[in-house]
Amino acid sequence: MSERFVCDECTRVEALRAVAGRGLPAIEPGMPVPAGTGLSRRSFVAKSLGLALSVYGVGRLGLFDEGIAAAAAARPSGKILVNIFMGGGADALSLLYPAGDPLYPQFRPTLAVDGGTAFTEDTRLFWNPALAPLATLHDEGKVTVMPSIGYAHPDQSHFTSRHYWEVGATDAHLLTGWMGRYLDAIGNADNPLQGLSMTGSLSPTLATAKVPVAAIDGPGQYDFYVNGVWGSVEERMLDAMGALGSVRSQDPSFRTAARVTAQSDTLRRQLLPFAKQGTSTPVVPYPTGDSFPQQLQGVAAMIGAGLPLHCVALDATGSYDTHADQTTALPPALTTTAASLFAFQRDLEARGVADRVLTLVWSEFGRRAKENGSGTDHGAAGTAFLIGTQTAGTQVGEYLGLQNGLDADGNLKPTADFRGVYSALLEQWLSFDASRIIPDAKLFQRPTLVK
């Protein structure tokens, strides 16, 4: 059996981005520099919240505890955008496969997908069976689907195309992420949780120029630290501290402190499953055996505890760079990703915070319409999803078909531009003028994304 092949360029992207924030090695002339370079990284423990963070950007470390507490008290019901990247170029013609297109079995004689349910808005398309959880959410009106999203004159380089999506422009020299620029405009200097990367290093999408943002490795970094105290004594002390959150007082300062204490105690209890397996029952069951669902579970717990998150970035499980052995590599990655996204949405709903959160799932491009024998090569238009109770739950952009919808390279043409989607999210969800963030924003049509 052949092994799944991942192209050298995709591996190189990951190698370079692994050191974002500490500078990058020299790269070839003409290659774009990833966003996030030039930001210094400093370790910080938010002691009252038990979060070990790598903080990127400006600010005095000593003020972050107070800044997080103040931000939590000031905006307990703010809107949150979660950004999830499916790395490697996920195959759009497998995520929503064109079963009703007569050319599909000719183009995909060994890779054609079978099964799944019809996509409501275009019955030529069917959901990949592995994406059944997303199909269920779509039937509930909670998923907006973009079956052919990208940009004009597509670049089939992982490095370049991913960079464009991250910075929100087809500009190889832009060094701040589109969400980072938004945080620069609305954020503050003392709350690094306003932009949280769950990838262990700085997500370039969150790269800022003015305000701090943070990164956390994952569930293993959630803990509570009390110097010189441990075991049952520590547990009793933390329980007693949590009880202080219920004390009533007429003093505004005391009330603020009590609220933060209560939020911290709630977070501690919700994160117990990560630190002590089996000591607590999760609100909603998540898939096991992978860090991505655990990270999403942690995000839901943080939102439920009232932490002042605003923009969050994660990487979906698996690699989607399926040059070979696609039938073996793609289904398990899609299965875990879809099941995790479904659990995350149900978790937010169970906690009563779902109306505050939208989740954007994207990949840097799709893949070639014709298979290469056991896989697919780099393409153009890809598939993206917007998930949440407040999304419009419809289709953005159309599927043009394999007869007339391919470009000169044999790749699916985009019918929706990612910059228009970003502009719509900024304006319809975050109530912010997209022209301040997205270069030439006025040129891109805004689809209806929010109810």
Image: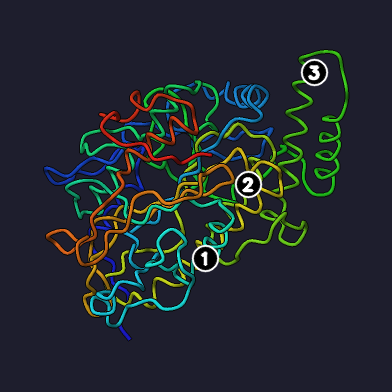
Query: Which residue is rendered at x = 39% and y = 65% of the image?
Result: 96
Q: Amino acid at mark 2?
A: Ala
- Neighbour class for label 2 at 10 Å: few (<14), some, many (≥20)? many
In the image as oriented, which residue stretches furthest toward the top?
251
Which quadrant would the N terminus be assigned to in this image?
A: bottom left
| Colour style of the rendered protein structure | rainbow
Q: Comparing marks 3 and 2, which lies closer to the viewer?
A: 2
**Image mark for residue 74:** none
Please name the residue shown 47% across and 48% down the image: 386
| Residue 3 in the image: above or below residue 32 | below
Q: Where is residue 70 shown, x and y percent of the image?
A: 64, 21
Residue type at mark 3 is Phe
Q: Residue 313 versus residue 441: which sits nearer the camera? A: 441
Foreground: 372 or 30?
Answer: 372
Which residue is label 3 attached to?
254
Left or right for 37, reference 76: left
Q: Residue at the location (60% across, 30% down)?
A: 78
Q: Which residue is mark 1?
A: 336
**Is 364 left or right of 409, judged from the image as shown?**
right
Q: Is residue 106 left or right of residue 315?
A: left
Secondary structure, mark 1, is: helix
Whole-angstrom CA distance, mark 1 to mark 3, is 44 Å
Judge the density around disc 1: few (<14), some (14-19), many (≥20) Cα neighbours within 10 Å: many
Q: Earlier in the sequence, mark 2 or mark 1?
A: 2
For the residues bearing labels 1 and 3, Cβ distance under 8 angstroms: no
Residue contact between numbered discs 3 and 2, judged by CB atoms under 8 Å? no
Label total for image = 3
Residue 254: percent from left, percent from top: 80, 18
Between 372 and 64, the one nearer to me in the picture: 372
Residue appearing at x 64%, y 40% in the figure:
303
Mark identifier at residue 300: 2
Work out whether 164 lies above or below 79.
Answer: below
